[in-house]
Image (tube, grey):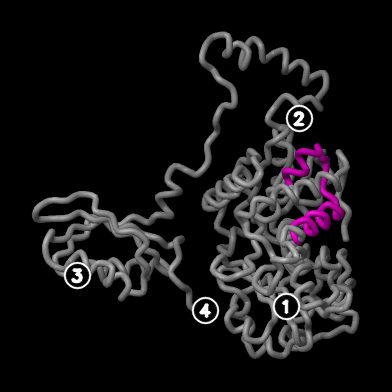
Amino acid sequence: MATVPSVSYSITVRLEVPAGGKAVSQLTHAVESAGGVVTALDVTNAGHEKLRIDVTCAARDTDHAQAIVDQLEAVEGVVIHKVSDRTFLMHLGGKIEMKSKVPLRNRDELSMAYTPGVARVSMAIARNKEDARRLTIKRNTVAVVTDGSAVLGLGNIGPEAALPVMEGKAALFKRFAGIDAWPICLDTQDVDEIVRTVQLIAPGFGGINLEDIGAPRCFEVERRLRELLDIPVFHDDQHGTAICVLAALTNALRVVDKPIENVKITMAGAGAAGNAVLRLLLAAGARNVIVCDYLGAVHEGRDDLDDSLRWIAEHTNAEGYAGDLRGALKGADVFVGVSAPGILTGDDIATMAPGAVVFALANPEPEVSPDDAREHAAVVATGRSDYPNQINNVLAFPGVFRGLLDAQANGVTQEMLLAAAGALAAVVTPEELGPNYIIPSVFHPDVATAVAAAVRESAGGRARGFTEA
């Protein structure tokens, strides 16, 4: 699928041009002729003979960015001095930092914040460990834990390469929910080592957010940590995605006036996200679901079923359909894709039922072109920011953890996930609801607060354990 210029591939080209002549006016034309978009043009130094100019523009990818630079360099009289990738500049030195919440201006303040005054606080916690939630950062701190095995759509790239993503996650926690989160990137993909490491660091945190850990390892890691820890453990790739999908589908079905109990849902993807989405959809009342992986429909007659696929087979596909995804899609009211790019065409969507809903969530390239899907479906959603109805986990996890921390919850229940999805869906008012607005913007001011309030109320002050679907 062709992409359009994006700020994520934004560059600033510092160059010199003759002060007279047509070079300045030709710069914008050069960028546009290469397919780029000029977002800023700043003269940083002026002289009688030369002008120094910073040209900032958006490209489609790194190769396209280089093509834009080549086009600029071809303008007569232009001398390129420096090309800066604005995304890399944002990441220089990392994106988060630690700041003190208390002043340390003199000896009195130092003696209260640190020794000797801090000893009294430590002894109070030693007598009652629950006081750690009241007297330390534990009450508002989350560990963002990864092993680097399933980072975004990049795959198993390791803990160091995962760190920029985890930093970004921590920044989102702070921006949208006021939560202090810290990246914990583990140099192991051994389940026992991951579980033991998180268990050992847990006293310093009020919650654990598991992130970008590959399936099926992520299932066992989460299960064991929930059993061991007395703080919430939330795997965002599973449960954050599930909350957002259910919220969006709730509103999409309102648009097409179909109850979830009556619709046929076809899913592509049986990994971590697909498993969690399925469980929450079933808990919300879905009855007719077929899940497909790369081998086709998941059914009880397959001889390759692991524990996760066996659960899916036992709870879906009641008629035992054994064909491929395209066959499963025929007559379906809803398609939910959490799988791979470009596996469907617009013609495939045309075989769905009238008033079809399509969620093509593979990133950055969806399972089907959104433009092609929109020709046949009533509602289309993706994970992309350049189309309406972006389903993004940032809609869920900040508010979920805000509610969990405020309630001093010991765990996460399915009821909390359903409450979060319902609250997120309700942010879109009946007056706003439509085919192109089934899910609010990540910057909507009510999202995190609404989700947090729903989770907090569902938690009832404290909750323990996790109830499977």
Left or right of residue 298, residue 103 in this image: left
Q: Residue 447 at what x, y percent from top left?
A: 69, 53
Task: Return the residue at label 1.
Answer: 357
Task: Return the residue at label 4.
Answer: 1
Which image quadrant: the C terminus?
bottom right
Could you tell me the amino acid type at mark 4? Met
**Upstream in sequence: badge 1 or badge 3:** 3
| Quarter of image, res 134 | top right
- How packed mark 1 is, by other alpha carbons closer than 10 Å (few <14, some 14-19, many 20 or more), is many
Could you tell me the amino acid type at mark 3? Val
Q: Residue 247 at what x, y percent from top left?
A: 76, 63
- How packed mark 2 is, by other alpha carbons closer than 10 Å (few <14, some 14-19, many 20 or more), is some
**Upstream in sequence: badge 4 or badge 3:** 4
- How packed mark 3 is, by other alpha carbons closer than 10 Å (few <14, some 14-19, many 20 or more), is some
Label disc, if present, on residue 98 of the rendered structure:
none
Residues in magenta, as a range: 401-425
Labels 4 & 1 near each other (Cβ < 8 A): no
**Viewer-proximal residue among 467 and 45:** 45
**Separation of marks 2 and 4 at Cα, in angstroms:** 49 Å
Task: Return the residue at label 3.
Answer: 75
Q: Please, what secondary structure does the residue beneath circle 1 have?
A: strand
**Separation of marks 3 and 2 at Cα, in angstroms:** 62 Å
Task: Return the residue at label 2.
Answer: 133
**Separation of marks 2 and 1 at Cα, in angstroms:** 44 Å
